[in-house]
Image (cartoon, helix red, strand yellow):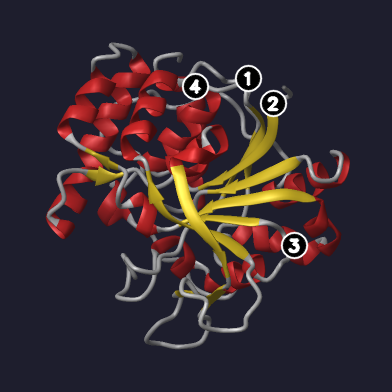
Amino acid sequence: MNARKIIIDTDPGQDDAVAILLALASPQELELLGITCVAGNVPLPLTTRNARIICELAGKPETRIFAGCDAPLERKLVTAEHVHGKTGLDGPVLPEPTMPLQAQHGVEFIIETLRAEPSGTVTLCPLGPLTNIASALQKAPDIAPRIAEIVLMGGAYFEVGNITPAAEFNIYVDPQAADIVFKSGAPLTVMPLDVTHKALVTQERNDAFRALGTPVGVAVAEMTEFFERYDREKYGSPGAPLHDPCVTAYLLQPDLFTGRHINVAVETHSELTLGMTVADWWRVTDRAPNATFMGDINAEGFFALLTERLARL
């Protein structure tokens, strides 16, 4: 079986880092064509730095990394240092990267790749705000029908918001971009907070990462220990949710997740609910379904997959 061609679009972020490591550990199933970075958890200079640090940690310095958009389409950038620390990757002490950034802009790379590869063979995997993906769709509308699938982490329905009472962070940072992506007609699979808040790094699961005894295993344990302090205090949960690795895990083992094909709309105007993903979970409207919105995860299977794959790096 040929490996699935993917582009990861990301704003690392400790959980983004784990999602990237899971992809890099799975070359038989996933061919990572490149990583495009976007401003989100931290500003763009830090997200591009962090992506390179992670690839070097994994022993994959040949990975192509591109800088994308440094601000949302229409709004000022909102960041999340209060969760991820001032670098976005606080926790482990890792060396500064030496691998280069590619000269090409990330949006241009997305467009060029989707035009060059056979139609329906490239999956986009956004782990942060959707600015790069929306910008590519705006600049090159012809790429939309060429996308195999967009598998993204973002939004919420039953869990509502984590950055405002109504909105999840990635969608809130650039709701206009999210609106473009959800209206694009490309096949969408969404990993909302409803799923990711069930993928909790308990002490036992973190001990399993550390017990790998490798630089990757120890770094992942230190990353999750750092950012779980915020979620433990906020939610009273037994550990931190690993949001973004749900995207990569879905590509590797989709049967870990269950959801519904429904309509999902993004609120772009209301001051009260800006960035809310209005998911018609109960199918009470006549709006056409546009996304597979996941609702549950086999957490034990997810962490078994993650630990087994990280052991390969």
Q: Amino acid at mark 1?
A: Gln
Chain-order first, disc 3 or disc 4: 4
Q: Residue at coordinates 51% horizontally, 16% vertically from top-left?
A: 59
Q: Neighbour class for label 1 at 10 Å: few (<14), some, many (≥20)?
A: few
**Front position among marks 2 and 4:** 2
Q: Residue at coordinates 66% horizontally, 35% vertically from top-left?
A: 34
Regarding residue 73, the answer to whether it shows in the image is no
Quote the CA–CA distance across marks 4 and 1.
20 Å
Q: Amino acid at mark 4?
A: Glu
Residue 206 at x, y percent in the picture: 23, 29
Q: Neighbour class for label 2 at 10 Å: few (<14), some, many (≥20)?
A: few
Chain-order first, disc 2 or disc 4: 2
**Front position among marks 4 and 1:** 1
Q: Is the C-beta separation of discs 2 and 1 under 8 Å? A: yes
Q: Quadrant of residue 33?
A: top right
**Front position among marks 1 and 3:** 1
Quote the CA–CA distance across marks 2 and 4.
22 Å
Residue 260 at x, y percent in the picture: 52, 61
Q: Which residue is mark 1?
A: 28
